[in-house]
Image (spheres, grey):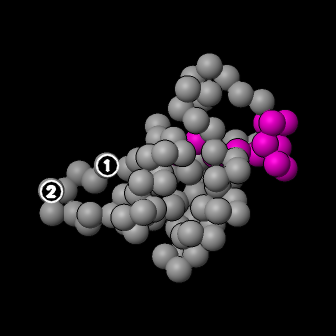
Amino acid sequence: MVGLNEIKNFLRNRNVVFIVANIGFTIKRIPDEETFSFWKNEVKIRLVEPEQAISGFYLESFPGEYCYIAYEYLPVLKNSSSKKYIILKVYH
């Protein structure tokens, strides 16, 4: 799992790709040009920190009563992109 500070560092380096995984829906890749606005307006205010995810959290604590737990996807291939793929699992 990754938290707020790690994602902020990835964003500073401009090498983040967000992928939203919501049960019952198609996996959605956020277009590169929408990455920062998606982070600022959607994810940042609903991100569950790794410690919270382990100890427990309440959906009512987040706007709209849904939230995201973020995972870094680690590519299998050595020559893969330098981008950081962040899988955002939706809880609602």
**Amino acid type at mark 2:** Lys
Coordinates of residue 14 in the picture (x, y in percent): 40, 68
Name the residue: 31% across, 49% down. 74
Name the residue: 58% across, 57% down. 20
Q: Is residue 60 above or below residue 77?
A: above
Viewer-proximal residue among 76 and 11 = 11
Name the residue: 84% across, 36% down. 60
Asked whether 27 falls inside the magenta stretch, the response is no
Residue indicated by mark 1: 74
Q: Is residue 71 above or below residue 12?
A: above
Q: Is residue 36 above or below residue 20?
A: below
Asked whether 68 falls inside the magenta stretch, the response is yes
**Amino acid type at mark 1:** Leu
Q: Is residue 71 visible?
A: no
Q: Between marks 2 and 1, how big is the CA–CA gap?
A: 10 Å
Viewer-proximal residue among 64 and 44 = 44
Quarter-wise, where is residue 38 in the image? bottom right
Q: Which residues are magenta?
A: 59-70
Residue indicated by mark 2: 78
29 to the left or right of 24: left
